Image (cartoon, grey):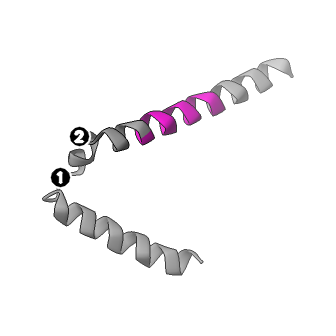
Amino acid sequence: MGVILGQIGEEAFYQSMVLMDYRLLGYFGYPTAAVFLVLGAATLVAHLIRVARGRRAK
């Protein structure tokens, strides 16, 4: 599954980089991308808080 989806993901990433003139920071100018970045960061922070609380309880 990773071999198939990896190739599809790589091609999509390449196409998006061409559209952005090879600027990785170009993604951050779109509101939709900002929403996904905030959601991803919130998920990561929530996980780290749960891990920290779990270690403190032991």
The x and y percentages for residue 31 are 31, 38
Residue type, numbered disc 1: Arg
Q: Is residue 16 left or right of residue 8?
A: left
On residue 29, the disc is 2
> Farthest residue toward the bottom?
4
The x and y percentages for residue 14 are 27, 69
- Look at the numbered disc 1 and give the secondary structure of its residue: loop
Q: CA distance from mark 1 to mark 2?
A: 11 Å
The one nearer the camera, 32 or 39, is 32
Q: Is residue 12 magenta?
A: no
- Report the quarter where the N terminus lies: bottom right
Dominant SS in magenta? helix
Numbered circles on residues, count: 2
* Residue at figure coordinates x 27%, y 47% from the top left: 27
Q: Is residue 55 left or right of residue 32?
A: right
The x and y percentages for residue 50 are 71, 27
- Look at the numbered disc 2 and give the secondary structure of its residue: helix
- Magenta part of the protein: which range? 36-47
Where does label 1 land, which residue? 23
* Residue at figure coordinates x 57%, y 29% from the top left: 45
